[in-house]
Image (cartoon, rainbow, N blue to C red):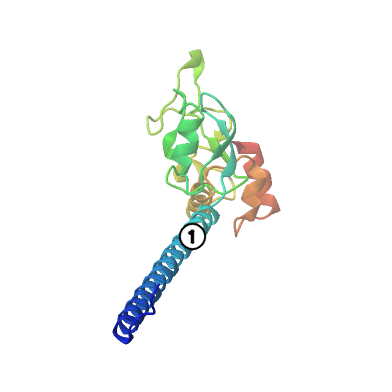
Amino acid sequence: MGSLSRSQLLVYGAVAVTLLLVGARWIRAADERSQTAGGVSFSSASGSSGSAGGSFGVEAQGGEDVVVHVAGAVREPDVYRLPAGSRVTDAVERAGGPTARAELQGLNLAARLTDGQQIIMPARAVGPGGVVLGAGTGDTLDGPISLGTATPEELDTIEGIGPVTAQKIVDFRTQEGGVSSIDQLDEIDGIGPATMDSLRSRLQP
């Protein structure tokens, strides 16, 4: 085989250089695509991680449930767990709703529940023959007055209780969502030991 001429060597050399340039450019492009793909993948992973973190944050801020004891004139008195932010009316409904004797005006149904709270639905007094005496009907009993439904006027009839203290008792009952014991009235300003004795003799929870 004869030796190549100078012109042929130049041609072959030019072709070889061209192939090298094309190959180098292709390799560089492949590297850039790989880096871009890697960047997208990393970004996606970061987004997933951020999303998971966001979900955890929402869960942590959701608040805990509250456990309350619903008693008194409700159909199913018991201890119930309700979502945070629930109201007294939600607890009453959870306990089956009020009975026919329930005195709804004696309970603040809009009050927000707190964990460990006891909610007592007051009941209207029962007269002779089992007749329920409604508030404001003018019917009264010779026996003790119901603390859960007593009006300021009824409380004012108790010895040592004036109009101002009677209204304080009603306000205290509303704020507490009901009063389960007469001894709780000792927390009211202006009620001393002698007044407490009068309240115990004339009131019933």
Residue visible at 56% across and 30% down in the picture: 72
Label 1: which secondary element: helix
Image location (x, y in percent) of residue 180: 61, 39
Is 135 displayed left or right of 80 in the figure? left
Residue visible at 45% across and 22% down in the picture: 132
| Residue found farthest to the bottom | 6
Q: Can residue 106 be spotted in the picture?
A: no
* Quadrant in which the N terminus is drawn: bottom left
| Residue found farthest to the front | 2
Q: Nearer the viewer, residue 5 or 113?
A: 5
9 to 123, vertically: above or below: below
User: Which residue is label 1 attached to?
Assistant: 45
Q: Nearer the viewer, residue 61 or 11?
A: 11
Is 125 displayed left or right of 183 in the figure? left
Q: Nearer the viewer, residue 179 or 159?
A: 179
The number of callouts visible is 1
